[in-house]
């Protein structure tokens, strides 16, 4: 949809293909009838496809539409990350210490999310040592390998050799089956589903010695006292 749509009285064509506010197709209607319909519904007639034959117009609240479109554009801009390219210059005969210093600077740039352009400039007869420059660049890439990967291999361009290194995006693994923690960072309680209490099993101590045996299921049932029969007692005495 263009930045500036023709609305209401700015639409000069005699007929339009009309779409209502719910997206339903109303067919080809006269522009004046479409304007009257928009007025009755307290909406705007907005041309959304001027290249159509006839042009396509829609009934909508144009002010609300512009506000929501602007809001979406701002959110999309916030999500976009601008990647800048930083440059590190080497020489094919650089010593190890200087290369490590250059590598530390490159690591800092990569950790900031920037792409690094590594270049070596050959002067005069140094161009005959282009193979040494390639070895130096590959060694540099090995030093920063934990923070960046080669995006474009070393390539000779005129009297310069160029290599690009991109930052490595580390994705955090999703936690599954871990112990639940509280909001303050302390570990939560361990579930006892697989070891219910009162199962009659022997519980062991941390030093490996056996613990006390649960007596829930081992309690002896007390037998009810047997009632004495008075008739039996009397007969025994009579005998």
Image (cartoon, helix red, strand yellow):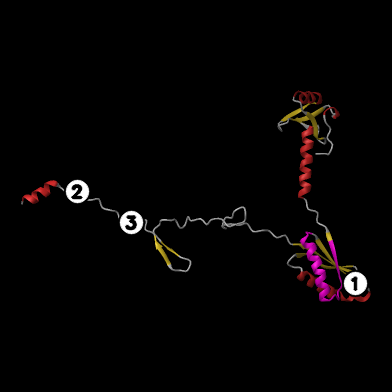
Secondary structure beneath label 1: loop
Q: Which residue is mark 3?
A: 219
Quarter of the figure that contains the N terminus: top right
Instruction: Kindly report which numbered mark, 1 or 2, lies closer to the viewer in this rendering.
Output: 2
* Callouts 1 and 3 close, C-beta under 8 Å: no
For the point 80% across and 25% down, the residue is 35
Instruction: Kindly report which numbered mark, 3 or 2, lies closer to the viewer in this rendering.
Output: 2
Question: How packed is label 3: few (under 14 Cα within 10 Å), some, or many (20 or more)?
Answer: few
Q: Is residue 201 left or right of residue 124?
A: left
Q: Quadrant of residue 6?
A: top right
Secondary structure beneath label 2: loop
Q: Which residue is mark 1?
A: 122
In terms of sequence position, does the residue under pointer 1 or pointer 2 come before the other?
1
Q: Is residue 58 visible?
A: no
The magenta-colored residue range is: 86-113
Pick the front one: 47 or 167 = 167
Residue 100 highlighted magenta (yes or no): yes
Q: Is residue 203 visible?
A: yes
Pick the front one: 64 or 159 = 64
In terms of sequence position, does the residue under pointer 3 or pointer 2 come before the other?
3
Q: Which residue is mark 2?
A: 227
For the point 43% across and 68% down, the residue is 209
For the point 84% across and 36% down, the residue is 4
Q: Position of residue 175 (x, y in %)?
A: 61, 57
Q: Tell me the distance, in whole angstroms, between the alpha carbons under discs 3 and 2.
A: 24 Å
């Amino acid at each position: 949809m263009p930045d500036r749509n023709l609305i209401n009285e700015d639409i000069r064509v005699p007929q339009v293909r009309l779409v209502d506010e719910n997206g339903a197709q109303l067919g080809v209607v006269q522009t004046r009838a479409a304007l009257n319909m928009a007025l009755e519904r307290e909406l705007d007639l907005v041309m959304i496809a001027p290249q159509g034959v006839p042009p396509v117009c829609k009934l909508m609240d144009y002010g609300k539409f512009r506000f929501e479109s602007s809001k979406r554009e701002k959110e999309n801009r916030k999500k976009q990350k601008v990647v800048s390219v930083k440059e590190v210059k080497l020489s094919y005969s650089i010593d190890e210490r200087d290369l490590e210093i250059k590598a530390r600077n490159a690591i800092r740039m990569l950790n900031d999310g920037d792409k690094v352009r590594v270049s070596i400039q050959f002067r005069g007869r140094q161009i005959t040592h282009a193979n040494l420059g390639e070895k130096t660049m590959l060694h540099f890439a090995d030093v920063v390998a934990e923070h960046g990967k080669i995006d474009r291999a070393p390539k000779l361009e005129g009297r310069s050799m160029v290599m690009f290194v991109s930052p490595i995006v580390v994705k955090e693994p999703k936690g599954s089956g871990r112990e639940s923690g509280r909001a303050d960072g302390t570990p939560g309680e361990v579930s006892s589903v697989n070891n219910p209490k009162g199962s009659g099993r022997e519980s062991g101590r941390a030093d490996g010695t056996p613990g006390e045996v649960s007596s829930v299921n081992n309690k002896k049932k007390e037998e009810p006292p047997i009632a004495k029969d008075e008739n039996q007692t009397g007969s025994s005495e009579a005998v």
